[in-house]
Image (cartoon, coloured by chain):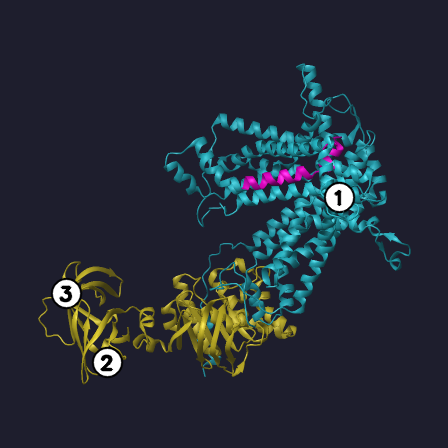
Chain colours: A cyan, B yellow
Amino acid sequence: MSRTSAAVPEPRGPAVAAPRQRHGAGVWLAGGLVLAFLLLFFVLPVARVFITAFVDGDGSLTFGHFSAFFGQSLMREAFFNSLYVAVMSAVFAALIAVPLAYFTVRFEFRGALLIQTLGVLPLIMPPFVGAVALQLIFGRSGSVNLLLQQHLGFTLPIMDGLNGVIFVEAIHYFPFILMNLTVALRNIDGAMEEAAMNLGCTGWRLFRRVIFPLAAPGFVAGASLVFVKVFDDLGTPLVMGQTNLLAPQAYLRITQVGLEDPLGYVISVLMIVFSIAAMALSAQMLKGRDYSTLQKGGGSIQRRSLSMGGSVAAYAWIGFILLLTLSPHIGVLLLSFAKVWSYSPLPDAYTLAHYATVFQDSSGMIRNTLLYCGLAAGLDVLLGVTIAYLILRTRLPARQWLDWIATASLAVPGIVLAIGYLRFFKGMTLPTWITGTEILLTSTWVMIMLAYAVRRLPYALRSCVAALQQVHVSLEEAAESLGATKLRTIQRVTVPLMVGGILAGFVTSFITAAVELSATILLVSADSQAPMSYGIYLYMQSVAGRGPGAALGVLAIIVVAIGTWISHVVVERTGSRHTQRPVDEKLPPLALATPAPGEQR
Amino acid sequence: MKKVSVQCRNVRLAYGKTEVLKDVSLDIQPGEFFALLGPSGSGKSTLLRLIAGFNRHQHGEVLVDGQDVSPLPPWQRNIGMVFQNYALWPHMSVWDNVAFGLVERKVDKAMLKTKVGAALELVGLAAYAQRRPNQLSGGQQQRVALARTIVIEPQVLLLDEPLSNLDKTLRVQMRQELLAMQRRLGLTTVFVTHDQEEAMTTADRMAVLDQGVVQQVGAPVTLYDEPANIFVAGFVGTTNLLPARVSARHGDTLTLAVAGLGDVQLPAGVQAPAGDSLMMGFRPHALHIEPADTVAPAHGIVLAGTVESSEFLGEFTRYSVRVGSHALHVDHPHQAGGAAFGVGSAVRLRLAAAQVRLFAG
């Protein structure tokens, strides 16, 4: 073989993959299949959305739809409301997360486990489920305001209008900032801080000038994620009756005006553009700023012990946040057991009837969730492993594009992908030999499953890439030099070593798909196809359905919690397998150093 | 077992515009323990990986047992390689690691059991068969890596910096064991190292590489005593190098003008390269150091100097002696109670002309 493109003078470094020169047909085939999948179920449908937004009825290019959009005061309002809600949610999430992150890294106290729990709890419940419960606790006639009214004579408008959306979203999404920031803070080398202190910088100035700037990349990454998530969220505002935001407007346009209405597509384009802009902005700010300064053998920033007063304050703050974070869960749990709950701080009577209803009516939904999410997550890790292998272990031309395309689906809201599917596959039918009758492609559950797979692919992909990066190339080369072909090496060495990452990716994809509503809500074409997330939404539409809805919500939380726990255990277990355990043993002298008696001659 | 030879003929390899190997030719004899020695970035590991089939050359050929193996992928070459970081698979037990290559070769169960058992016996780790690699010490891991490689009975054994991850005492033990095992198996072995002591103590012959070019090939003692150029002289052992100019040639005698030192007369027998601009080299232990006021008659070259610094190394003391504008390394054997030369003391250095080597400047 002739050329290897990269200039790698000493190709044996730990991170440098050996240049692989020859590709069998298998590599091309795998790359081609992945590309075909991404094109068909992601790129083309989304492209279709863009085209529709920019094309007139007669097929000519136009910006008319956009001027029509901004010409309507309702649309303008929705646009600015969305921006406002997303920004304010990020701000409030930061207010909750920054002190918590700083506490865990800076001070010696036993709240670390509590804070870790805080980081996971909100994420295991879809925000729109929490919204209903929070309405009952913090709403105008909810528990808190009833108590305030009774004892202090005033109420707090926490859940009113957009405030409510901001409140729910901030409580739900602050863990993104908390987790990113904590990791970033932990990776700061203690010497960074010591040098600053040595030069006379302490206290608040130390935090402002050294600690926070060093951890800023983590903060920015987390905050931009919160912005994007909130900007794209459909379920929460819909459940809370706030329709003057972009995502609900797109949904209403498509469902009420019709698939031909161009404003739905304009909104879709705006949502994608803002998602990409937020991510690009954060990427721009993070560019060249890998601040993870922790040296080998160096320690993190020094922990201090808290004073008595400080301890009390810290625990009080954490307790308050924990209670706030738990309130949706508590609310949903209470609601699922409540016979009647209105105009009182706690339910008046309790019953198990809602669970009975759910088990009677909704076993199909539970089965659907397991089926769709299981298949989608399986597809995701299959694609994830393939793409990871192609980009890290082969020199397939343009392989990086597969990664970029797959990751780009982060920027596409579920509702936009759903609109793209409905439009792109419009009128296409399944071949009659499969089902006997003509069935529209868009009316099958396969579309829901595919939407889940595409939307969750980035999570599984990152997980697989990280897992493969940890497999040193020499582990594979050793197999090849012992006679294993490439395919056998992948089977016997590469995949077994990646198995922890693959499982973690599977579980992440599974649990996040299980609580997905925004694509589901458009793609479900018959009640028999509905997964749990859609079922909860349907129940929550009526006051009478809130009890069973909450019961179904509790089941969803249990499914997600079990999944989260499993992925945690898997990651821990595989992690420990790869770390060298200290051993202290003398080597026995080797028999061959002095030839064995039988071999004297 | 049949002993095979390994040959490289005019091998060239470049990554883009970076030439890593420039026209490398080597002839490794059957059953030989051969070292590739060079600084990092010299291309020695690239060459080793090329023999294993992980790198591909653009020009030339690699022959194993007279057959060109260039078109063969790594898994068809039957060349065993022990990796620098051992590359033991953490998801397999020691036994499964060692059995790996035999499973690929579809060896039947009974045979596999015998062979893996024997290989583990050979490296003294039969009791550790069910452990995971991360439950072994560094030395044990290395032995497992070795067992895993030799169990497939490769034609050639490649070792990539095999001892660099071990602590010093273990390194000496492993060095001797590796050599003993290689002798017993009669396996043609190529190993890469940047440690000249390691290469000299173990290798039958060695090649010194620098910047992708083979500088010299030969037995360790040849490379040490007759280095082909300044690089080899400096890399294999320590050498004092002084720029010199030929000022006169009278029959057998050569007069050199050494900058900052004056004229030096060299008698017959010293090989001098063509040209007038040369480098004069000699080993630190070739210099004999004595007090400046020594009255005994001096033979050979005599230089007067002052001690600038000294390092006590146990077997000898290494002095840095200022002679004219040069600082020369001088090794003086150490004996208990022997006199030491203090910093600043005036000394006389004697050098036998036969110890001087001349290189092209």
Residue A519 is labelled as: 1
Q: Position of residue A589 (x, y in %)?
A: 44, 68
Same chain letter for marks 2 and 1: no
Tell which circle, 3 or 2, labels the residue nearer the N-terminal end: 2
Observer-nearest residue: B324 or A42? A42
Q: CA distance from mark 3 to mark 2?
A: 26 Å
- How far is disc 2 from disc 1 in space, using C-alphas? 88 Å
B293 or A246: nearer the viewer: A246
Instruction: Residue B273: give its label.
Output: none
Instruction: Determine the image quadrant of residue A87.
Output: top right
Which of discs 3 and 2 lies nearer the camera? The answer is 2
Residue B114 vs residue B171, the one in the foreground: B171
Is A224 colored magenta in this rendering?
Answer: yes
| Residue A563 among magenta residues | no
Where does the C terminus of chain A fall, quadrant-wise?
A: bottom left
Residue A575 x/y as whole percent? 58, 52
Residue A230 seen anywhere in this rendered image of the structure: yes
**In the image, farthest residue toward the right:** A437
Q: Is residue A511 above or below residue A173?
A: below
Identify the residue under disc 3.
Answer: B347
Q: Which residue is mark 2?
A: B270
Q: Which residues are magenta?
A: A218-247
Q: Residues within 10 Å of mark 1 (few under 14, many from 20)?
A: many
Residue drawn 25% across the image and 74% down it: B277
Q: In terms of secondary structure, where does tag 1 sit?
A: loop
Q: Amino acid at mark 2?
A: Val
Left or right of A409 in this view: B211: left
